[in-house]
Image (cartoon, rainbow, N blue to C red):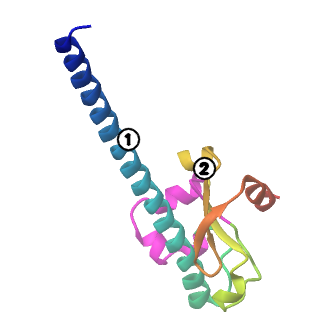
Amino acid sequence: MSTATSAGSRKVLSTVLMVAGLLAAVAVGVANGARQSIQFDLRVIGQSIYEAHETTGRWPAGVADLEGTAYLKMPSRRDLLEQGVYVVVWHPDLSGDRAANRHRILAYDGRSRFARLGWVWACRGDLSIDRITSRDVSALKK
């Protein structure tokens, strides 16, 4: 192999690696944005559950009970709940103290690509957001 051919091959390889690196960076950025969006929605759903309870004195039992809360005031959010994109676990017996509900799941991601891969984000009763297992999701569906 000549020196010119070797230099040309290195240039092509470095260009391919640079393009691959840029594509990977874009993919990571898109995934990070999607994750942040899911976590935002879940946290506002959790806040809206407490907001509905503060307004009516009872825990919401369905999407209609969240009417007038921060989540349903945002565009198109009712559809996300009704289509199961986000799944709310309707608890009739939560504590008014959020910290006491930290082991309870209020809502979880039901249909994103992350969820399909088994990376399900959930909002807990203390409004923290973390990943739950497919076993946790199965238990919530019972």
Q: Give the camera-side residue of 13 and 31.
A: 13
Looking at the rendered image, the quarter that the C terminus falls into is bottom right
- 83 left or right of 96 in image: left
- For the magenta stretch, what is the residue range? 64-88
What distance separates the C-alpha of mark 1 from that of mark 2? 21 Å
Q: Is residue 132 above or below residue 12?
A: below
Q: How many marks?
A: 2
Secondary structure beneath dot 2 equals helix
Looking at the rendered image, the quarter that the N terminus falls into is top left
Residue 38: percent from the left, percent from the top?
49, 60
Kindly identify the residue that appears in the image at 75 percent across and 79 percent down. Answer: 92
Q: Is residue 135 above or below residue 125?
A: above
Q: Give the camera-side residue of 19 and 52.
A: 19
Kindly identify which residue carries mark 1. 24
- 33 left or right of 41 in image: left
Q: Is residue 77 magenta?
A: yes
Residue 60: percent from the left, percent from the top?
65, 77
Secondary structure beneath dot 1 equals helix
Residue 55: numbered disc:
none
Q: Is residue 83 above or below residue 127?
A: above
Image quarter for residue 54?
bottom right
What amino acid is at disc 2? Ala
Q: Give the camera-side residue of 90 and 64.
A: 90
Residue 125: percent from the left, percent from the top?
65, 79
> Outermost residue, left direction?
4
Kindly identify the residue that appears in the image at 24 percent across and 22 percent down. Answer: 12
What amino acid is at disc 1? Ala
Residue 7: percent from the left, percent from the top?
20, 20
Asked whether residue 12 appears in the rendered view, the answer is yes
Q: Which mark is first along the chain, 2 or 1?
A: 1
Kindly identify which residue carries mark 2. 115
